[in-house]
């Protein structure tokens, strides 16, 4: 069953892919200009001009003429063949280690001549490279700045290689033994740090002999998008609590600022889970809870919940649809043989409607232009006027 389009189909410059032209044994009756079909008898595609059918097969196309540099066979047939014409150039490889290839090109870009010219260099153009190289060691050995120090004593013939006081390693530095850094500041500028030790010890090699009144934790720097900030999370020496401060001030390793919000999956007290993102722990037997939020599961056995309070105000499906203003169907028969634009009133009070048009006799769906002219009406537009009561329209909203 074919779908009937009763309005122009605009593909908006998109491709029509894998399409097939209508196959007929004879030409369609009552043709219009621009109509096309495929004749299964002579295997030719025809299109309709102002007065006749014109075939697109052999003999109907304009002859193709082979231009400069081209040759062709059967140029008037359905599938012409064009080839590059031969030139006077002999097919071969030109140029070698002792010869340079030369070519002549015509205006069409074809090679019309090709040859090879022997390379000849006069002896006066050759430089003598036999002069000895002096101070080989001093000239060829150099140290990388901030990595290797090199000095050469020309008189003594001594080459000295060592490390400078300030060392920069450009590649990977591997220390197979222990690494001890005795300094005031240790700075690590890297994007990824991997440490095998599962425990970080903060505050020194051994426990301090007295209270130094300093906090212990992690200071971090970040940017909010409008300002640079310093954050801190760790042990607050003054309160004895673990603290998070998103906008912190560091005064000699003592952090101050407004405590921040911590987001976690669940809270435990001892071995008991007291609260998670969605569940109050079963061990909680005492609570000051006076209001309930969203109820995810359960069976409601009380009175009907009103629409204003999120319910349907009904206990049957029919009553619920009525209370909630569920979708309604409006149908009608259209067509009078003269009008191409037909207004249909549905009185649904919304633009959110679905419109379907079908042939009243064979029940096939037809496609036309649909314009939602108001919240209570639509206008159906056809390329030609439908006959009297030819189509039925269904509006759901």
Image (cartoon, rainbow, N blue to C red):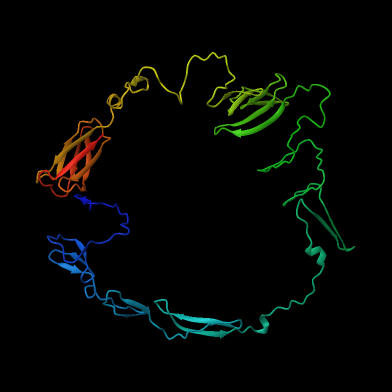
- Is 177 located above or below residue 295 in the figure? below
- Compared across the picture, whether 309 is left or right of 165 comes to left
Tell me where residue 381 appears, x and y as whole percent: 18, 44
Location of residue 328 by image quarter: top left
Q: Residue furthest right?
A: 156
Q: Position of residue 353 (x, y in %)?
A: 26, 36
Residue 218 location (% of width, % of height): 69, 31
Give the mark count. 0
> On the picture, is 141 further left or further right than 287?
right
The quadrant in which the C terminus is found is top left
| Front one among 367 and 106 | 367
Observer-nearest residue: 83 or 113? 83
Q: Depth check: give the residue in front, 9 or 112.
A: 9
**Looking at the image, which residue is at 27% across and 25% down?**
322
> Residue 329 in the image: x percent, y percent?
23, 34
Q: Is residue 68 above or below residue 268?
A: below
> Does residue 74 appear to the left or right of 151 in the view shown?
left
Relative to 108, say whether 375 is above or below.
Answer: above
Who is closer to the viewer here, 37 or 258?
A: 37
- Would residue 226 be found to the left or right of residue 307 on screen? right
The residue shown at (82%, 65%) is 137
- Could you tell me which residue is drawn at 20 percent across and 31 percent down? 347
| Quarter assignment of residue 300 | top left
């Amino acid at each position: 069953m074919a779908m009937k389009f009763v309005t122009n189909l605009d593909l908006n410059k998109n491709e029509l892919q894998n399409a097939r032209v209508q196959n007929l044994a004879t030409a369609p009756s009552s043709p219009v200009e621009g109509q096309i079909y495929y004749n299964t008898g002579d295997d030719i595609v025809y299109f309709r001009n102002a007065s006749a059918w014109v075939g697109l097969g052999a003999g109907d196309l304009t002859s193709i003429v082979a231009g400069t540099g081209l040759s062709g066979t059967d140029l008037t047939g359905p599938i012409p063949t064009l080839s590059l014409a031969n030139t006077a150039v002999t097919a071969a490889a030109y140029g070698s280690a002792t010869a340079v290839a030369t070519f002549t090109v015509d205006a069409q870009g074809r090679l019309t001549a090709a040859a090879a010219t022997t390379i000849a260099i006069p002896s006066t153009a050759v430089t003598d490279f036999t002069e000895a190289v002096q101070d080989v060691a001093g000239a060829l050995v150099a140290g990388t700045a901030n990595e290797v120090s090199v000095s050469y004593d020309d008189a003594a013939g001594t080459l000295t290689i060592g490390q400078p006081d300030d060392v920069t390693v450009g590649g990977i530095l591997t220390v197979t033994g222990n690494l001890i850094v005795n300094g005031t500041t240790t700075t690590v500028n890297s994007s990824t740090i991997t440490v095998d030790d599962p425990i970080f010890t903060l505050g020194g090699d051994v426990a301090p002999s007295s209270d130094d009144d300093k906090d212990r934790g992690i200071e971090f720097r970040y940017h909010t998008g409008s300002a640079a900030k310093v954050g801190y999370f760790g042990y607050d020496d003054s309160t004895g609590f673990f603290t998070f401060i998103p906008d912190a001030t560091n005064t000699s390793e003592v952090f101050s600022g407004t405590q921040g919000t911590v987001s976690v999956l669940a809270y435990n007290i001892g071995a008991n889970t007291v609260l998670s993102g969605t569940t109050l722990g079963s061990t909680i037997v005492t609570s000051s809870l006076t209001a309930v939020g969203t109820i995810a599961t359960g069976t409601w056995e009380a009175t009907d919940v009103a629409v204003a309070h999120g319910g349907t105000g009904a206990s049957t499906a029919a009553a619920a649809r009525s209370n909630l203003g569920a979708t309604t169907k409006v149908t009608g028969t259209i067509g009078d043989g003269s009008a191409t634009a037909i207004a249909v009133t549905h009185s649904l009070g919304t633009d959110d409607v679905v419109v379907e048009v079908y042939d009243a006799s064979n029940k096939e769906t037809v496609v036309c232009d649909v314009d939602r002219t108001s919240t209570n009406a639509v206008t159906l537009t056809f390329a030609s006027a439908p006959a009297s009561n030819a189509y039925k329209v269904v509006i759901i909203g």
